[in-house]
Amino acid sequence: MIQLPFLRENKELIKERYAKRQLDAASTIDQILSLDDQRRSTQQEMDDQLAEANKMAKKIGDLFKSGNAAEGNQLREKSKGLKDSANALKESLRKIEEEQIELLYQLPNIPQDKVPAGKSDTDNEIIYTEGIPANFDHEALPHWELANKYGLIDFETGVKITGAGFPLYQGKGARLQRALINFFLDEAEKAGYQEVIPPHLVNEASGIGTGQLPDKEGQMYHVTEDELYLIPTAEVPITNIYRDEIVKAESFPIKKCGYTPCFRREAGSYGKDVRGLNRLHQFDKVEIVQITHPKESGKALEGMIEHVKGLLQKLGLHYRIALLCGGDLGFAAAITYDFEVFSAAQEKWLEVSSVSNFETYQANRLKLRFKNEAGKTELAHTLNGSALALPRILAAILENNQTADGITIPEVLVPYTGFDKI
């Protein structure tokens, strides 16, 4: 959530940056600032009336002590009127603040200056590419055919048990999935991230804290009876560990990682792009999260990018990095880099990771603060990244490592799988 003082002081700059998102937020910004004027004037009027009532209280006491009960009662009535008026103003103030916060929730994060303007993923900037596409001397099969051929994933039974988008991993497919999870967790630990196992359901306050609510409410599975939400990513519970906290500046950077299943409704997704593992309602992911001093978040983002690059290099995958344009930028992100691996069998790029800096946007919602060198309370910066999301990584490994008589397992995974070929 954008900080009100920053919004007031940088209104034109913010409108200009929102243009990168193809967003005209002028009306909403003006409404918020108008409400802020009302809030401040109402607060001042309420404070003045309460102060006057407090002054009267002392005078009333003196009048009764001096035996002037008639004037004391008259002043008491006037004081009661002031307090009633102040209570009415307090209720007005509450309504103004509620309306203001609802409008602030509608504003996405402000894109960084280096974020390119654009409408969709076609306007993203490819900033880095590594590796070469796999070259086959046989007909390359897509991963869903390979999974069926070698008995790795049973999509049809998953549909029977639950529905489309809930695959059933089995045999060496299940073992390969678990190998990837353990590999990613071990690499995160080597990079200084502390592993946590967070809850897989969160309350509304947690969803609001990281920006999933109310923006992505329609994409989250909602357990209505208990007012809980299945997590779309481990970012939500891990970052919310620090909601309503004042952390010690000397503890920066705070680095956490965690493996969780993730649940997304993916409403409106259909067609060839959702075949097999390309887009699921339930999938596994290892997430890395950092909480940093604002001066260090840029450096932290670079470190997270290098970490994900290292994972893909060790897996031997051909990948590229895209700097997302404003129109493709997530609601809470100030800047995001997407990692995509190339599927030679499908002849397309598959997104496998997003690494983002949220700056103070999430921290303001979370009330996640620290005390700076001057002893003043300041908002921290939050960052997160997929390291990595499993479905498309698994798809890329199957498709790019296929041979005429099987699938070769990347060398780095063999100690985890116990086999080097399927």
Image (spheres, helix red, strand yellow):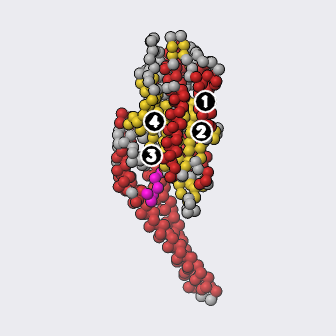
Q: Amino acid at mark 2?
A: Ala
User: How far is mark 2 from mark 4, CA to CA?
Assistant: 20 Å
> Are the residues at dot 4 and dot 1 in contact (C-beta closer than 8 Å)?
no
What residue is drawn where x is 55% and y is 79%?
55
What residue is drawn where x is 54% and y is 52%?
293
Q: Where is 406 relative to 41, above or below?
A: above
To which residue does mark 1 refer? Answer: 183
To which residue does mark 3 refer? Answer: 334
Q: Amino acid at mark 1?
A: Phe
Among the two numbered marks 3 and 1 on one chain, the one whose residue lies closer to the N terminus:
1
Can you tell which of label 3 and label 1 is closer to the viewer?
1
To which residue does mark 4 refer? Answer: 338
Can you tell which of label 3 and label 2 is closer to the viewer?
2
SS at circle 3: loop
Residue 267 visible in the snapshot: no
Among the two numbered marks 2 and 4 on one chain, the one whose residue lies closer to the N terminus:
2
Q: Residue 377 at what x, y percent from top left? A: 56, 59
